[in-house]
Image (cartoon, helix red, strand yellow):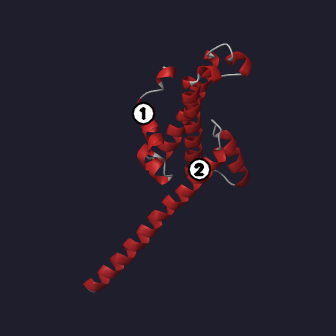
Amino acid sequence: MRPAHLVLVAAAAFSAVQSRASEPIDSRQADMRRALAAVGPSTSEEPALRGERQARDPSPAFLLGAALGAWINAAAQLDFDRDNPTAAGPPHVSQSGADPDALAQDCAEEKLAFFHLEARRGTLGLSAEQAAAIVPLDAKSLASWRSRISAPPPICG
């Protein structure tokens, strides 16, 4: 083969590899976005996974998206109940002040959701930043994720 042909073959091979490399990211993005939507306001990934299993086996990216959505919701619920202690728990209980059982439940839900998130992220071999770039995730949520990797929320000690 002449050197010019080698360059053309190498360029064609690089182009083919590059296009295949972008396919999984597009597929992952679609799966993660579908999972985030399926989770809705739930603090658990399980309802989204049940729905997905009816149509197909959840992909690793779908699992990650569902775990991310559940953790974002669980963390938001914990933040809300921490900031509004009389709003936490059942109405009849919350009328008399903060409900420590409701906050403990929020902490347990956040901890479980975060455990699933980190397990799903590890399965894909992605950093939080890489996973956040696929969705894409807003800066506040990414900052919360980075902070949570270091330590649990202070209220959950």
In the picture provided, is 110 more to the left or to the right than 38?
left
Asked if residue 8 is positioned above or below residue 33 in the image, the reply reads: below
Asked if residue 145 is positioned above or below residue 57 in the image, the reply reads: above
Q: Amino acid at mark 2?
A: Phe
Asked if residue 103 is positioned above or below residue 29 in the image, the reply reads: above
In the picture, residue 142 is in which quadrant? top left
Q: Residue at x 49, y 59 (%)?
A: 25
Q: Disc 1 marks which residue?
A: 147
Give the quadrant of the N terminus.
Answer: bottom left
Viewer-side residue, 64 vs 78: 78
Q: Residue at x 64, y 17 (%)?
A: 101
Residue 73: give its label.
Answer: none
Q: Nearer the viewer, mark 2 or mark 1?
A: 1
Q: Disc 2 marks which residue?
A: 62
In the rendered image, the residue lying farthest to the top is 96
Where residue 157 sits in the image (x, y, percent)?
Answer: 48, 19
The kind of secondary structure element at disc 1 is: helix
